Image (cartoon, coloured by chain):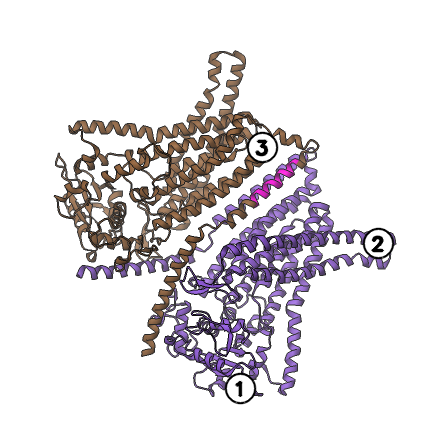
Chain colours: A purple, B brown
Amino acid sequence: MKESWSSVDTLETNFRPLVVIELAKGTKEETIEWFTKRIVDKKANGGAQLLIKPLVTENGDENIYLVGASHLRLLLGAENVGLVKECNDNSMRAFTYSSRKTFKDFADDNQNFLTMSECQYIIKHELENLRAKDEKMIPGYPQAKLYPGKSIVRRLLTNGILVQIFPLHDREELKKLRHTWYGQVKIGYQPLDEIRCYFGETIALYFGFLEYFTFALIPMAVIGIPYYVFAWEDYDKYVMFATFNLLWSTVILEVWKRICAVMTYRWGTLLMKRQFEEPRPGFHGVLGINPVTGREEPVYSSIKRQLRIYLVSVPFVCLCLYFSLYVMMIYFDLEQWALDYHEENKSHFSNLMLYVPSIIYAVVIEIMNRIYRYAAEFLTSWENHRLESSYQNHLILKVLVFNFLNCFASLFYIAFVLFDMKLLRQSLATLLITSQILNQFAESLLPYWLQKRHMKKMKERMHSLKMDTDLSLVEQVNSEKEMGTYLGTFDDYLELFLQFGYVSLFSCVYPLAAVFAVLNNITEIYSDALKMCRVYKRPFAEPTANIGVWQLAFETMSVISVVTNCILIGMSPQVNALFPDSKMDLILTVALVEHLLLAIKFVMAFVIPDKPREIQIKLAKLEFESLEALKQQVRVTDLYSSER
Amino acid sequence: MKESWSSVDTLETNFRPLVVIELAKGTKEETIEWFTKRIVDKKANGGAQLLIKPLVTENGDENIYLVGASHLRLLLGAENVGLVKECNDNSMRAFTYSSRKTFKDFADDNQNFLTMSECQYIIKHELENLRAKDEKMIPGYPQAKLYPGKSIVRRLLTNGILVQIFPLHDREELKKLRHTWYGQVKIGYQPLDEIRCYFGETIALYFGFLEYFTFALIPMAVIGIPYYVFAWEDYDKYVMFATFNLLWSTVILEVWKRICAVMTYRWGTLLMKRQFEEPRPGFHGVLGINPVTGREEPVYSSIKRQLRIYLVSVPFVCLCLYFSLYVMMIYFDLEQWALDYHEENKSHFSNLMLYVPSIIYAVVIEIMNRIYRYAAEFLTSWENHRLESSYQNHLILKVLVFNFLNCFASLFYIAFVLFDMKLLRQSLATLLITSQILNQFAESLLPYWLQKRHMKKMKERMHSLKMDTDLSLVEQVNSEKEMGTYLGTFDDYLELFLQFGYVSLFSCVYPLAAVFAVLNNITEIYSDALKMCRVYKRPFAEPTANIGVWQLAFETMSVISVVTNCILIGMSPQVNALFPDSKMDLILTVALVEHLLLAIKFVMAFVIPDKPREIQIKLAKLEFESLEALKQQVRVTDLYSSER
C-alpha cells in the first residue's frame, strides 16, 4: 500500500479505490441499490464480485462511487482478461492463478504484482462484462430495456444514468513519472516502461512511435541542413537526397515493426490472445440470434450496412473531396487577385494583403477538417458497425482520405499543375510550420491553461491551497472528474501522419522539412506528456500489440511519395537539361526509376523480417511448448484408453 | 473392410496393410529386428505402436514390410496429428478420442470413419516421429549416428538403409475414382472431394486450382476469339481487352482465395493447427541445443546461412540470369543470320533454315531450365535450411526468377527493344503452343507409355495376365514399388504460372493466348489425372489450407502484366496516332493510366474479403467457443479458490 492511500484504509481495511463511477444526479434509489448489488454479487450469481463504496462529498450528494477489488479477485481477473506476465525463467506467459508461483515477483502478500493500471483495466473489463440475466429493464427506468447477455454498464451509459467511469490517478506515482518523463532537463529516452505501467500499452506505444520517428527523422534532417546552408541547387544532390529519403522511409517503417515487437513482447501484449469482441455501445438492431455466439442480441443486416456505406458514405466522401478541391480553386483565385492588387497598388497594405488568402485558406482548411470529422463520425456511427474495431477502421479511413486531400491538394496543384517549385517550397514551409504551431497550441497549451485556471478557481472555492499530493480522496475525485477526457491516440497519430506527408511527399523540393519535423516532435513529446499528466483524466489502459491501421497508412504514404518525388525530379530544370534532345527519354527514364524504386521498396519490405530473430525464437518456443502440452494431454488419453 | 483386402485377412484378423516399407537388400538382421521392434513397441516405451508384417515374395527376399495399425491406434493418431472432421451439428472440429461420439459417421465399428489416405498420413506421421531414445547409432551400422530425439526413419533414409516408404493404392477405390474423374466422356466438374479423399488436400487443391483457373480463363478466351475471327486491329478494342484482362486477373486471384477457403474449410485443413516443424532430413550441423525446443539436435548458425545465401546463391542466380540473357542475344544474332541467309538465297532450304534458330533456342531454354533446376536444388540444399518449408520457399524463388526470365526475356526484348509487334505475336504463339505440347508429352504421355510397357513386361514375366483389381497383394506391392515417385505439385504449378504469364503479360497483343490456354488446361486436367492414377506411386496425403507461395507468385505476375500491357498499348501506332503533336502527353497518359490500374488492383485486393462471410462466421464461432471454454475453465478455478 502506498502512503497516499493510507487515508482510504480508515474506510475499510484493504479497500483501495481504483475506479470512480459517477451516476447522474437524482438517480433513483432502487436503481443504485440494484446496480451496486450486481457489482458486489458473487461471480456464481452473475455479479462482478468487486468492492464498492459511496464517496461522501461535502454537500451530501451520493452519486459518486469508488470501486475496488480484493487482491485475489484481481488475480483471477488478470487470468480472465488473459494478462501476460514475466515468469521466473524470464519467459512471458499468460497469467493463471494456479501457476501464480512461477511468475516473477509474485508473492501472496505482494500487492504490487499487478500494476495499478492493470488493476483498473481488469475492473473496467469486469464491469463491462457485467451482463443482464433475466432483467427485462433497468429497475426504475422502464425505457432502458435489457435482454439476457446485454452489458449493464453499456446500457446505463447509453441511457445517461451512468455519467462516466474513470480510473483514479495515483498522485505519488504520477509525480515520479512526471519527474523522470519531463521534469528534468536532460537529453535521453522517454521512460516508456514507466509510461506503460501508468497509462497502458496503447499510449506508451504512441510515445514510443513518436520518439522512434523523431530519431528516424534525424538522418534526413542532418542531410537536409547543408542544402539550406549552402543553398545547393544541383539536381544530383536533390536526386540523392530524395532517393535516400524514399528508401529510408521504407527501412524505418520496417524497423519500427521490429522495435514494436520487442517492446510489446516485453510488455506481454504481443502474446495476449484477442478477446472476443462484444458489440459496440452504439450498435442497434432488432433482437435476433447472433450466428457466432448463438446468443440473443440485436442483429443488423450486413447488406443494409454495405448499402449505407457504398450508396451514402462513399458518395458523401467524394462530394466532400470535390468541395475541398473547389475551395482550393477559390483560394488560388484569391491568391491571384491579391497578387494583381499588389501589382497595381504596391503599398504596405497591398503587401499585407498578399498573406490574407493563405491565412483564410489555412483557417478554412482547419474548419473543414473539423466539420468533416463530425460528419464522418456521424456517418460511421449511422453505418451501424457491430464492432468497435470495424467502426474505428471505417472512421480512420474516411478521415485520412479527406485530411490527406485537404492538406496536400494545394501542394499537388502547385507542383503538378502550376509547376511553380518556388511557390511549392514556400507553401510547404508555411503549411508545415503554421500547422505545427497551431496544433501544439490547440492541443496542449490551451487545455493546460484552461485546466490550471479551473483548478485555481476550484481550490479557491474549497478554501484550501494544499499541494497536489496532499489532497484528500474526496478532493482528488472531485478535481479529476472535472478534467477533460482523453479521446485516444487518433489525433496524435493523424498529426504525425500529415507531418510524414509534408516531409516525404515533396522531400526533394524542401529538404529542410525534416529539420522542422524533428524540432516539432521534440517539443511535441513534452507537450503531449504534459497533456497526459496534467490536462486529462487518467485514461484506462488499453493492451495493444502494434499501432494497427496506422502502419498501413504510413506505408501507403511512403509509396505515394515515391511517385511524387520521381515526378518532381523529372520536372526539375536541371534534370531536363540532361535530356536536351528528347523529353521522351527523360520521361521514360523517370518512369523506369520510379518502378525500380517501388520494386526495391516491396522487396525490402518482404526481406526485412517483421520480428527480430530473438523474438521469433521466443514465440516459437512458446508455441512448441503449447503443442507439447497438447501431446502430453493426448498421451494421458492414450494411457487411459489402453487401460480399459 | 473392402473386398479387395479380404486376401489380407488370412494373414491376421484386422491387419489392413496401408504403407509399404522397402529396406535395402541385404540389410542386417539386427537392424531389421531393432527397427520392427521400435515400430511395434508401445507408445509408453517410445515406440510407434503400429502393426508390421513382412511381405513374402516368390524369391524369398525379406526386404519389404507392410505397416498397418489397429482402429483405436489410428483414431488416437488422428487426434495426434490434429485432424479436423465434421461433427454431428455440421461444424468442423479437431478430432479428439474423448469426443469421438460427437463426430458425424463415427461408430466404434465403422472402420471407414477415417479415409484410407488419412490413415496412411497418420502412419507416415507416426513413423517419422519415431525418435531415438538413448541409441547412439543404428544397430549394425555404426556410421549411422543417432542422438536422442533424432527421427529414426529419416536417419535410415539418409543412410540408404531404408529405400522408400510409400502408401498402397486401393485398387477398388482407384477404379471408381478413375471412372468418375476421367473415365466417362462428360462435361462437368472434377470430383474434387473424392480426389481429396484419395490423394489428400495438396493434390486436390492443385486440381481445384487448375479447374478454377480454366473456368476463369474462359471469359478471356471468349472475348479473345472475335479479335482473331474478324482480325480486329482497332486500338480501342485492344485497350478494352487489356483493361478487362488486368482487372479480371485481380478478381480471379482474389476470388480463388475465397473458393479455396470454402474447400479447405469443408476438408478441415483450414482449421488444422500447424504442427511444430522438425528439421528437414538433409539438415546437418554440429550437435547443440535448439533454443526453441531445448532439445539436443544439430544446429547451424543463421549468419552462416545468410552469408551462403547472399554471397554465393544470389551472385550465382544473377550470373545465370546474365548467361540466359547472353544466350538470348545469340539467338537473336542467329535469327538475323538466318533471315539474311534467306534473303540472299530464297530457296526451300533457306526457308526451312528460318525455323532453325527458334527450335535451337526452344531446346536450349528447356535444357537450361533443367540444368538450372539441379543447380538451384543443390544450392538451396547447400544453404542448409533447417525447415522443409524454408527450403521450399528458397528453391521456388530461385526457380521462379530464372524460369520467368528464361521464358519471357526474348518476348520482352522483341516487345520493348525491337518494337516488333508482329514478331512478338508470332513468337508468343510459337512459344506458348510448343511449350504446351512438349509439356504434355514429357509430363504424362511419355511416362504413361513407359509405365505401360514396363507393366506389360512384368506381367509377362509373372506369367499372369489378370486385371488390375485381381492382382494379389504381393503382385500389387511389387508393381507399385517400381512406379515413379510423384515429386509434388511444384512442376504443375510452375507450368500454370508460365502459362498465366503468356496469357496476361502481352494480352493486348495476342488475345488468342487465352483460347490456347483453355484448350491446353482441359487436356491438362485429363493428362494430370492419368498421371496421378496410372503412372506414379500413390503419394502420401499432405494437409494444406492454401496454395501457399504460388498465390503470391500469381499476384506478382498480374502486377507485372499491368506494366507490360500499358507500355504495349502506349507503343501501338493507333494510340500514337491519337497524340500526333506530343509524344510527351502520350507517355504521361499511359503512366497515369498504369498507376490508376495498379491503384485499383490494390484497392480491389484490399476490399474483397479473403474468406466468404459464411466461413468467417463459422471460424468466429469456433474461436468464440474456445474462448468460452477457456472462461469456463477460469470459472472452475474461481469456484475452487473461493471454496478455500
Callout 2: few (<14), some (14-19), or many (20+) C-alpha neighbours within 10 Å? some
Callout 3: few (<14), some (14-19), or many (20+) C-alpha neighbours within 10 Å? few
> Mark 3, mark 2: which one is toward the viewer?
3
Three-letter code for the amino acid on which mark 3 is drawn: Lys
> Mark 3, mark 1: which one is toward the viewer?
3
Residue A342, disc: 2
Residue depicted at 41% across the width and 29% down the height: B436
Provide the chain ID for the residue under circle 2.
A
Q: What are the residue bounds of the magenta stretch?
A: B586-599
Counting from the top left corner in percent of width and height, residue B343 is at: 54, 14
Main secondary structure along the magenta-highlighted residues: helix
Residue A277, disc: none
Three-letter code for the amino acid on which mark 1 is drawn: Val
Counting from the top left corner in percent of width and height, residue A550 is at: 55, 57
Cα separation, mark 3 vs mark 2, equals: 54 Å
**Residue A266 falls left or right of residue B640:** right
Asked whether A264 or B518 is in front, the reply is B518
Quick check: marks 3 and 1 in contact, CB under 8 Å?
no
Return the residue at label 3.
B237
Looking at the image, is B276 positioned above or below residue A133?
Answer: above
Callout 1: few (<14), some (14-19), or many (20+) C-alpha neighbours within 10 Å? few
Return the residue at label 1.
A56
